[in-house]
Image (tube, helix red, strand yellow):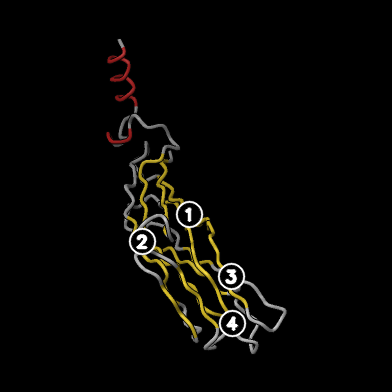
Amino acid sequence: MAIGLINAMNSLSGNVDQKYRTKPFGSIIKTVVECKSSDTFVSNSVTETSILSFVFSPDGAVGSVGQNKTTIFGFLYLWCYGVNDSSTGKDSRKQFTCSITGDDITNISFGPSQAIGNYNYGTGGIKTGYLSTILIPECTLDGSGHASISMDFKIRNENANANEAFEVFGDGTTKESHCRIFEVLQY
């Protein structure tokens, strides 16, 4: 009887991709972890520096109306420090930016100025370490396909000064900076 019920339910689901017939909507259908492979150190520069960049290839489940219906969520686990070790400058704040682009999503770019770091009101300089989890804005496949999605995370110093720097740690494992992406089945 159970097999007959499953067959009946499968026939009712029509054009839903076979791979996802037994998964309820809201299920995580793909998880990917991208690890930063090595440390990045930048000083005396205000150039945006990519700290982690990768391409995610969504599965793009075919929904009951024949369209790709998945949403991509993610978390960036960032282990870094910012420094200004001079009495001539007090600012160890850093600008963080993120861009998420792809042919089948609405492109996203975000990054408030001075998002990471501290301001030193004294004159001795400052060095602050961070272990942060940053929620990446969600993006949903627009229904036209499931092309690859590029993600790029960047940091830059606020000032060009030999004593102003940042370092982002990566060793190719989840012990240091990495990004965890989830693809969730929609209807």
**Cα gap from disc 3 to disc 2, whole angstroms:** 39 Å
182, 91: nearer the viewer:
91
The disc labelled 3 sits on which kind of residue?
Thr
User: Quick one: which residue is furthest to the right in this view?
Assistant: 121
Relative to 68, is 179 above or below?
Answer: below
Residue 59 pos. (x, y %): 31, 47
Q: Which residue is mark 4?
A: 85
Q: Nearer the viewer, mark 3 or mark 1?
A: 3
The disc labelled 2 sits on which kind of residue?
Asp
Q: Residues within 10 Å of mark 3 (few under 14, many from 20)?
A: some
145, 95: nearer the viewer:
95
Q: Which residue is mark 1?
A: 75
Q: Residues within 10 Å of mark 2 (few under 14, many from 20)?
A: some
Query: Mark 2 or 1 closer to N-term?
Result: 1
Q: Are marks 2 and 1 in contact (CB under 8 Å)?
A: no
Question: Which image quarter is the N terminus in?
Answer: top left
Residue 170 placement: quadrant? bottom left
Q: Which residue is mark 2?
A: 103
**Cα gap from disc 4 to disc 3, whole angstroms:** 11 Å
Give left or right: position of 141 versus 127: left
Residue 183 pos. (x, y %): 40, 47
Q: Nearer the viewer, mark 3 or mark 2?
A: 3
Relative to 79, is 47 above or below?
Answer: below
Q: Residues within 10 Å of mark 1 (few under 14, many from 20)?
A: some
Query: Mark 4 or 3 closer to N-term?
Result: 4
Q: Nearer the viewer, mark 1 or mark 4?
A: 4
Question: Which image quarter is the C terminus in?
Answer: top left
> Which structural element holds mark 2?
loop
Q: Which residue is mark 3?
A: 128
